[in-house]
Image (cartoon, helix red, strand yellow):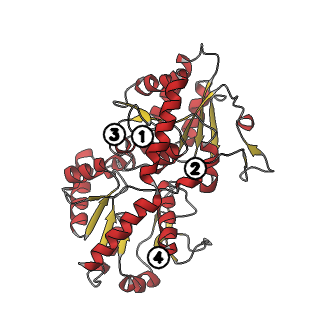
């Protein structure tokens, strides 16, 4: 997947490509999807493919001639997905001397549970594990964005040599201040601020940014938020949830809000251009997610950069990014009332919220893109020198 689909990985690759180009390097991005999309950046090579529902993924049967001719000219080949694009690459890499690098961005076991449930559990995980073990063994370098994912690769894919290089973002884009923005997704022009979202300054506004889909544990997040609103019902101010994004569970989300009479509490902003995201996040008091499938979630880093405490479930990727009690609050497991217990502290304790906000901003400095992309560039140079 790549643009026009918006995702953390899309933004990650787009930012890194731009950074490397600014350093004087030539970067080609090979992807699948519509060949009619008008890219606003150089050297994007699109292979014809058909969309897989509304997941954002596209499937194509093979690389086109342009891609096949391009691959042998490259100094470094870096794949971000082991199955379609990664598997196609392997047959071409036998004729290429360039090192093959793979970054594992996904908990493939949890995604298989979401998207391949028709295949028996034991069979799908046995195949998944064996293929990842085989694929990583073909690579000159495997990168894990967090220590937790490096450990998972060792256990699940028998790959014990992964190098940990965190994902990074452009911190400056999330460090305002913002006084409201034109919402170009609406008919007409309106200023996006709390008033335009029917949120008062006294309300506690939580936000979720990302795919509204099964693997993000959306049903659990909504259930916990419904419980949180009940727990805070006697408070003088309301608790609201801003959802920025779209996905396969959007209809479920709308139906949930209606069934639980939470239409005024759950604000569905829909998908937004990446440039708009910082200004929506800046309106909020904390970021909340129920996902346990993260590898090194960029939306969480973006929330930290915005000074938002993160309320989440302790899991690989999340626990590597958020320090419990310093930059956010982590529930031990995705059990009923677990997120509610942590979120109530944010809602009721202004001093704690301020402390965690300061800690979030400080923690975000670890993920400055010039640092993380610089580490990756140094790693490329080391590979080429061997």
What is the crowding at mark 2: few (fewer than 14 residues within 10 Å), some, or many (at least 20)? many
Q: Of marks 2 and 1, which one's residue comes earlier in the chain?
A: 2
Occupied quadrant, residue 254: top right
Q: Position of residue 146 (x, y in %)?
A: 33, 51
User: Which residue position holds label 2?
Assistant: 174
Q: Earlier in the sequence, mark 1 or mark 3?
A: 1
| Residue indicated by mark 1 | 291
Circle 2 — which element? helix
Q: Secondary structure at mark 3?
A: loop
Q: Is residue 236 left or right of residue 286?
A: right
Residue 103: percent from left, percent from top:
34, 62
Q: Are marks 3 and 4 in contact (CB under 8 Å)?
A: no
The residue shown at (80%, 50%) is: 189
Sequence-earlier tag: 2 or 3: 2
Q: CA distance from mark 4 to mark 1?
A: 32 Å
45 w.r.t. 251: above or below: below
Q: Nearer the viewer, residue 219 or 350?
A: 350
- Above or below, 168 relative to 378: above
């Amino acid at each position: 997947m790549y643009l026009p689909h918006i995702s953390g990985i899309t933004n990650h690759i787009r930012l890194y490509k731009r950074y490397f180009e600014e350093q004087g390097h030539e970067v080609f991005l090979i992807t699948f999807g519509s060949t009619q999309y008008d890219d606003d950046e150089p050297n994007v090579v699109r292979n014809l493919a058909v969309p897989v529902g509304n997941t954002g993924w596209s499937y194509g049967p093979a690389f086109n001639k342009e891609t096949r001719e391009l691959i042998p000219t490259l100094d470094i080949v870096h794949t971000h997905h082991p199955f379609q694009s990664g598997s196609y690459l392997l047959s071409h890499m036998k004729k290429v001397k360039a090192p093959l690098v793979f970054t594992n961005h996904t908990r493939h076991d949890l995604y298989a549970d979401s998207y391949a449930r028709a295949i028996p559990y034991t069979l799908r995980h046995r195949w998944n594990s064996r293929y990842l073990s085989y694929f990583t063994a073909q690579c000159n370098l495997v990168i894990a964005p967090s220590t937790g994912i490096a450990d998972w690769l060792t256990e699940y894919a028998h790959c014990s040599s992964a190098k940990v290089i965190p994902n990074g973002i452009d911190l400056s884009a999330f460090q305002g201040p913002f006084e409201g923005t034109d919402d170009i997704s609406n008919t007409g022009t309106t200023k996006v601020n709390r008033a335009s979202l029917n949120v008062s300054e006294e309300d506690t506004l939580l936000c979720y940014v990302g795919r509204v889909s099964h693997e993000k544990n959306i049903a659990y997040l909504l259930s916990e938020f419904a419980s949180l609103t009940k727990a805070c019902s006697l408070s003088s101010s309301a608790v609201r949830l801003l959802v920025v994004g779209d996905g396969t569970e959007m209809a479920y989300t709308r139906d949930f809000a209606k069934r639980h009479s939470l239409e005024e509490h759950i604000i569905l902003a829909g998908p937004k251009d990446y440039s708009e995201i910082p200004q929506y996040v800046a309106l909020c008091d904390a970021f909340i997610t129920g996902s346990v499938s993260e590898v090194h979630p960029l939306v969480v880093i973006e929330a930290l950069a915005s000074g938002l405490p993160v309320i989440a479930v302790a899991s690989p990727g999340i626990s590597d990014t958020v320090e419990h009690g310093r930059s956010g609050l982590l529930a031990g497991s995705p059990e009923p009332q677990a997120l509610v217990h942590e979120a109530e502290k944010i809602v009721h304790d202004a001093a704690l919220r301020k402390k965690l906000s300061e800690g979030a901003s400080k923690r975000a400095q670890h993920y400055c893109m010039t640092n993380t992309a610089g580490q990756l560039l140094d790693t490329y140079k080391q590979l080429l020198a061997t």
